[in-house]
């Protein structure tokens, strides 16, 4: 016969049931919200996530930029193995004169004008003794012909009187000549004397800013920054490649981004046309199947020679 009483047995059974229920609830963890409460919670979480400030893109280090810049140069070398100065010349004097004439006009127009100019004035002595009005008429197609005539006659006289009729091969001497700045001097040094130089024209400045090599606007400062990125041995050819790319693909108003071979390296991709078919229609010169700017291009130039003046 059991010694337990009915009241004691009921209490034990109730306690055991409650303990079992508590253990089950603990194992199951907190109950998930369902229905309207769950939907409201999810919506609130999504809204909060959207409102949270986004992390700014990680800034490119100087070392990473230099590596990217040098890779761009290597890839441009593969795209334009024939890159060259786009002014026709046969000697340092002709290159110096052509470069002065190229201000505020195209190399094509200069190349179409210089044959008659050099036929009339083949040497500094001849040009220094020119009748201004006659020279002005010859170079009129290049624009600003009066100012350019004054510069050409002045630099020719300086070459005759101070340098024995020869173009000097030093930057300090060249920039003292009338109408000759650092850009012109670097063109002459790099292409007529083999002295490395960076030519910062409008194309060069535009592209290096698009590529985030520098944000400088002053050509002298741009030259200094870029000179610090590349070894001196690359300066002259880098200038040609960048200018070639600016004239053929990376145009000022509507770059052909969708046809650009270095698009993956360009932080400004998307400023121009990204559709490949539409972009290809924007390509210029030999890239688009058209003549180049030189009447007498190098033998390895893959495009067509430019037409003579009046033959367009």
Image (cartoon, helix red, strand yellow):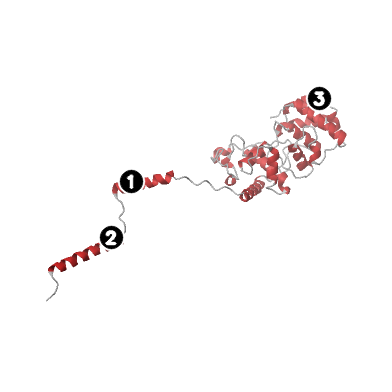
Element class at badge 1: helix
Image location (x, y in percent) of residue 39 = 33, 47
Give the mark, 2 or 3, whose residue is nearer the N terminus.
2
Residue at 84% from the left image edge and 33% from the top image edge: 158
Give the residue at mark 1. 40
Foreground disc of the pair 1, 3: 1
Instruction: Please say if 50 is above or below 112.
Output: below
Element class at badge 3: helix
Residue at 61% from the left image edge and 41% from the top image edge: 210
Q: Can you tell which quarter of the image residue 166 is in?
A: top right
Residue 154 seen by the camera: yes
Residue at 66% from the left image edge and 42% from the top image edge: 242
Q: Can you tell which quarter of the image residue 305 is in?
A: top right
Q: Are marks 2 and 1 in contact (CB under 8 Å)?
A: no
Give the mark, 1 or 3, whose residue is nearer the N terminus.
1
Q: Can you tell which quarter of the image residue 188 is in?
A: top right
Foreground disc of the pair 2, 1: 2
In the rendered image, the quadrant that contains the C terminus is: top right
Give the residue at mark 3. 132
Which residue is farthest bottom?
Answer: 1
Q: CA distance from mark 1 to mark 3?
A: 86 Å
Image location (x, y in percent) of residue 84 = 72, 42
How many marks the image carries: the answer is 3
Give the mark, 2 or 1, whose residue is nearer the N terminus.
2
Give the residue at mark 2. 25
Instruction: Please say if 236 is above or below 2.
Output: above
Q: CA distance from mark 2 to mark 3?
A: 105 Å
Element class at badge 2: helix
Task: Using residue 30 as the reference point, say whether residue 93 is left or right of it.
Answer: right
Image location (x, y in percent) of residue 204 = 67, 39
Comparing 35 with 158, the one in front is: 35
């Amino acid at each position: 016969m059991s010694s337990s009483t009915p009241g004691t047995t009921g209490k034990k059974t109730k306690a055991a049931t409650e303990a079992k229920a508590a253990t089950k609830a603990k194992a199951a963890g907190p109950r998930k919200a369902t229905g309207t409460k769950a939907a409201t919670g999810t919506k609130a979480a999504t809204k909060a996530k959207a409102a949270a400030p986004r992390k700014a893109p990680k800034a490119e280090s100087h070392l990473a930029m230099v590596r990217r810049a040098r890779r761009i140069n290597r890839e441009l070398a593969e795209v334009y193995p024939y890159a060259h100065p786009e002014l026709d010349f046969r000697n340092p004097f002709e290159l110096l004169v052509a470069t002065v004439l190229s201000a505020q006009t195209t190399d094509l127009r200069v190349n179409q004008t210089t044959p008659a100019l050099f036929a009339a004035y083949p040497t500094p002595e001849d040009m220094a003794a020119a009748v201004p009005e006659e020279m002005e008429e010859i170079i009129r197609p290049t624009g600003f012909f009066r100012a350019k005539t004054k510069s050409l006659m002045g630099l020719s006289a300086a070459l005759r009187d101070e340098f024995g009729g020869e173009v000097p091969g030093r930057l300090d001497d060249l920039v003292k000549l009338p109408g000759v700045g650092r850009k012109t001097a670097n063109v002459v040094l790099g292409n007529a004397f083999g002295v490395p130089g960076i030519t910062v024209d409008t194309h060069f400045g535009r592209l290096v800013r698009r590529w985030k090599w520098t944000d400088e606007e002053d050509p002298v400062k741009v030259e200094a920054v870029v000179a610090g990125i590349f070894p001196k041995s690359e300066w002259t050819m880098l200038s040609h490649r960048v200018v070639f790319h600016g004239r053929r693909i990376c145009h000022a108003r509507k770059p052909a981004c969708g046809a650009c071979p270095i698009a993956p390296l360009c932080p400004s991709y998307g400023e121009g046309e990204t559709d490949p078919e539409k972009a290809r229609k924007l390509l210029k010169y030999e890239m688009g199947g058209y003549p180049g700017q030189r009447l007498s291009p190098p033998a390895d130039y893959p495009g067509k020679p430019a037409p003579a003046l009046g033959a367009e």
